[in-house]
Amino acid sequence: RAGWTGFFTCGDRDAVYALLINTIILNKNRWDIVVLQRLRNSSEVLQFCSILQLRHVGYSLIKMGKLYGLNKYDVFSEYFKSRKSKNRDNYLRYKRRLEKIGKLELRTSDDLEPSEVLANIKKISCNSWQGEEDSSIFSEKNPITNIHKFHADIIKNKHKRICPISLILMFDGEPISYRYGIRINEHYTSYATEYDNTHKKNAPGLILLYQSMEYLFGKNVNQIDYGIGEGRLKTETTDWEEDLYTIYIFKNSIKSNLLKLLRLIKFSLNKSA
């Protein structure tokens, strides 16, 4: 089960999708149902489903959630002016409050070694609400096996086309919030953000959100999306939204067919509720 699935393809996209489907089929003795959650770009999703049909693989496709993002502004001040005055005032109020009592600084993966990035992220994660609930992708206790190692490896190994970008808000030399994502060509996707609960009243996540945008606009990133999930902060700080899709892949077995039936019943009940 993939909590959030993205495909990074090079060359023949059909061939890449076919290879992925072949891998799923060849390993069918290891699964009963495959769930690829929250896929964006409806045309690519339909293309993927058409290959499943050609291979006579059972599946169902449903719309599930939204993705929020924005396109690049020429300068950050132009973007900032486009936000509601209440949102601008909140950011400036929290930022000035911290600057009055200490030094506020943005550190990035440009000036930090991967080991320093990970050390700062883990320090924040230990004191965040996600860390307390073991839901942080950098927590060793996350129920998704080895997900912390997967993302740590991405941070350690930069690639020409897939570049991890980590942004860390420091207060008096201590990390209080981070945002971690991946840049592919001119597109940036945010995968995770957390803040230290001891600084919650000063909204470090909000401060970092706006500072992240200013940093990314200056790095020739033409499009930013803030990952899965919906919330007031995302709708207030972004300009567009996209539907996300989930694909359920089944095999012809008693257990798989039972899971398929249960999923259909659950979906029907949720729709009628």
Image: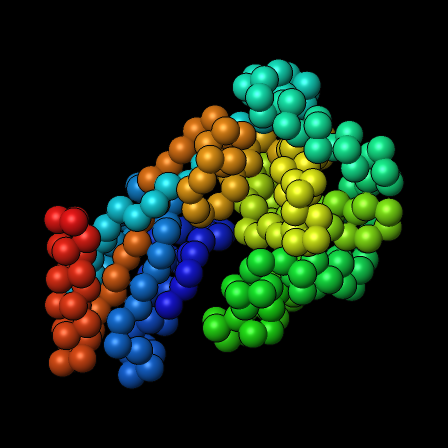
Q: x, y percentage for residue 53?
A: 18, 58
Q: Is residue 248 visible?
A: yes
Q: Is residue 69 visible?
A: no
Give the side of residue 4 with respect to residue 25, left or right.
right
The quadrant holding residue 102 is top right
Give the side of residue 8 with respect to residue 253, left or right.
right
- Does residue 68 sit above or below 166 in this rendering? above
- Does residue 259 sit above or below 59 in this rendering? below
Q: x, y percentage for residue 70?
A: 51, 30
For image coordinates 30% across by 48% down, the residue present is 64
The quadrant holding residue 20 is bottom left
Residue situated in front as seen by the camera: 85 or 218: 85
For image coordinates 43% across by 29% down, the residue present is 240
Q: x, y percentage for residue 231?
A: 45, 40
Q: x, y percentage for residue 78?
A: 64, 16
Could you tell me how many numbered marks the image carries? Answer: 0
Residue situated in front as seen by the camera: 164 or 130: 130
- Does residue 203 sit above or below 19 in this rendering? above
Which residue appears farthest toward the bottom when viewing the image?
29
Question: What's the colour scheme?
Answer: rainbow
Quadrant housing the N terminus: bottom left
For image coordinates 58% across by 65% down, the residue present is 132
Residue situated in front as seen by the camera: 62 or 237: 237
For image coordinates 57% across by 52% down, the residue present is 192
